[in-house]
Amino acid sequence: MGRAWIELDTDALRHNVEVLRDSLPAGCALMPAVKANAYGHGAVLVARELNRMGIGAFCVATVAEGAQLRRGGITGEILVLGYTHPRQFSLLHRFRLTQAVLENTYAKELDRCGAPVEVQVKIDTGMHRLGERWDDLDKLSEIFACKNLHVTGAFTHLCASSSSARSDRAFTLAQAEAFYRALDALRGRGCVCPKAHLLSSYAVVNYPELGGDYARVGIALYGMLSSKEDTKNCPLELRPVLSLKARVAQVQRLCRGEGAGYDLQFTAQRDTRLAVLAIGYADGLPRSLSCGVGSALLNGRRAPVVGRVCMDQTLVDVTDVPEVAPGDAAVLIGVCGEQEISACEVAEQAGTISNEILSRLGARLERIVV
Ligand SMILES: *Cc1c(COP(=O)(O)O)cnc(C)c1O
């Protein structure tokens, strides 16, 4: 807890696991998304806690993320959701990772590398991002014919499940129907997928009845949805897992009229005290919080960001916050006394979603379990 750090509340994580498990139909288990360093939380730390809670399946975006989990002692199936270059195919075998098969030509390339590898078939039901089209059964069944590929499952991604607009509901239900129809047709051709899954966080909240063997939950597991509004309206009682804190490096006393920071974007309108926080945009604090948009919590009070957020430091106005001294901890995301800054609030200030704020929290931050 030197300069700037993340605190993980494992009670909150456990609580979210229980709430999400309770909301799923029988037979549907959690397959947490721990990609992007577990949305900034720290992939090995989080997956280790989840392993302890009995979770035995994870998904990541890259083969390197999967390898990192294995090196950290994580057990269970690890599904690599995204593209792996042929040069890295050997890592799949070495670290016992399951590769998503994006399309049938990709399956054949993976098959040619000669070592047995577990795969799950990605079926495109309308998002048109990754996957083989759901109605191209010839191409889909060719994947199952590959000698070195052992198919452990199939999955699709619902791309409109956060919306309750009538057209989006119809689209989501059509995606699910296409997915299950493709699986039935494949079964008819002798192509068996032991596991099938399609739910992510918003789908768990809005369409739990669509079922499947796994729910690939990311943002909800970390205790929120993507926006303040959605989190407020969410029927599940989720608790944020992460807090972001930084030390006060120095307290500056400015006379009225003096400026501060790059391009002197701040001018003191009165005699002012500024706390210099040891965190900046290189740590993932968005630069768009500059000049009064964002704030930090100190001694239970809000202190507005003044001037430009720098790469490694951020200035906040603590004129109205008593007794701030170097070494104090400021809260950038989390609770301090009566006050709270949520990741969703920061996302709103930065014009993005909580997923982006969390997943960009930087490698320089220490991560500790509290
Ligand atoms: C990231 C990801 C998820 C998890 O999404 P959340 O909305 O954070 O729950 C699920 N499935 C796929 C394919 C993903 O890429």
Image (cartoon, helix red, strand yellow):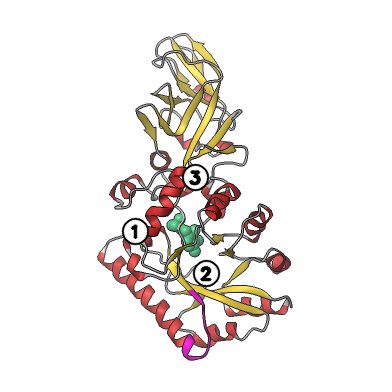
Left or right: 259 as drawn, with respect to 311: left
Observer able to see residue 177: yes
Q: Nearer the viewer, residue 252 or 195?
A: 195
Q: Is mark 2 within 8 Å of ligand 1?
A: yes
| Quadrant of residue 59 within the rendered picture | bottom right
Front in this rendered view, residue 63 or 30: 30
Within 10 angstroms of label 3, few (less than 14), some, or many (20 or more) residues?
A: many
Residue 283 covered by magenta stretch: no
Q: Point out the tag, 3 or 2, that comes first from the N-terminus.
A: 2
* Circle 2 SS class: loop
Residue 162 visible in image: no
Q: Is residue 204 above or below residue 141?
A: above
Local SS, label 3: helix
Q: Position of residue 58 (x, y in %)?
A: 54, 60
The amino acid sitting under disc 3 is Leu
> Which is closer to the viewer, label 3 or label 2?
3
The residue tagged 3 is 358
Q: Which residues are magenta?
A: 187-195
Q: Is residue 76 left or right of residue 352?
A: right
Residue with the mark numbered 1: 205
| Secondary structure category for the residue under label 1 | helix
Closer to the N terminus: mark 1 or mark 2? Answer: 2
Disc 2: which residue: 130
Estimate how packed mark 2 is, as few (under 14), some (14 to 19) or many (20 or more) residues with alpha carbons within 10 Å: many
Q: Position of residue 139 (x, y in %)?
A: 55, 85
